[in-house]
Image (spheres, rainbow, N blue to C red):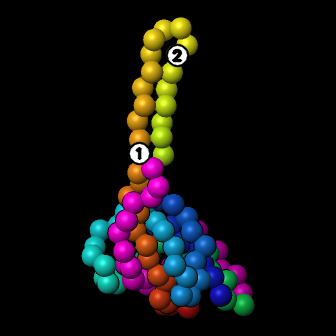
Amino acid sequence: MFAIVEIAGLQYKVEQDQKLFVNRLSGEAGDKISFDKVLLTVNGTTTVGAPAVSGVSVQAEILDHLKADKVIVFKKKRRKGYKVKNGHRQSLTQIKITGFSGL
């Protein structure tokens, strides 16, 4: 059984006891959170929402807040003397899917 869920503006395919990294969510490590925007569920039969499946939610637990690996952004325009180097580390939250309700 799995579901397609919208979390922080992005869509993820989630299953029971799955761990995944999503964009930073509010809350502390150990907090329980629920996602109500379930777009599709597959449990023997497929249920497609328009735009979301009503009455179904996905429960998760926040495991940790961390940062992704550094990405170097380098811009250069040749023969102009223009060079800019920047780095970026995305803030992430690791969550674990604990269950589905309303199925």
Q: Residue at x 41, y 45 (%)?
A: 88
Amino acid under disc 2: Lys
Q: Which residues are magenta?
A: 45-70
Query: Mark 1: which secondary structure?
Result: strand
Separation (CA) of disc 2 from disc 1: 21 Å
Can residue 44 be spotted in the picture?
A: yes
Q: For the C terminus, which image quadrant?
A: bottom right
Give residue 66's quadrant in the image: bottom left
Q: For the N terminus, which image quadrant?
A: bottom right
Can residue 58 be spotted in the picture?
A: no
Q: Position of residue 76 (x, y in %)?
A: 51, 21
Give residue 48's quadrant in the image: bottom right
Whether tag 2 and tag 1 are in contact, CB under 8 A, the answer is no
Q: Position of residue 2 (x, y in %)?
A: 63, 82
Mark number, residue 4:
none
Q: Residues within 10 Å of mark 1 (few under 14, many from 20)?
A: few
Mark number, residue 88:
1
Asked if residue 72 lies in the magenta stretch, the reply is no
Q: Residues within 10 Å of mark 2 (few under 14, many from 20)?
A: few
Of the pair 51 and 21, the residue shown nearer to us: 21
Q: Position of residue 42 (x, y in %)?
A: 67, 83
The mark nearer the N terminus, 2 or 1, is 2
Q: Residue at x 31, y 79 (%)?
A: 29
Query: Mark 2: which secondary structure?
Result: strand
Residue at image mark 2 = 77
Farthest residue, direction left: 28
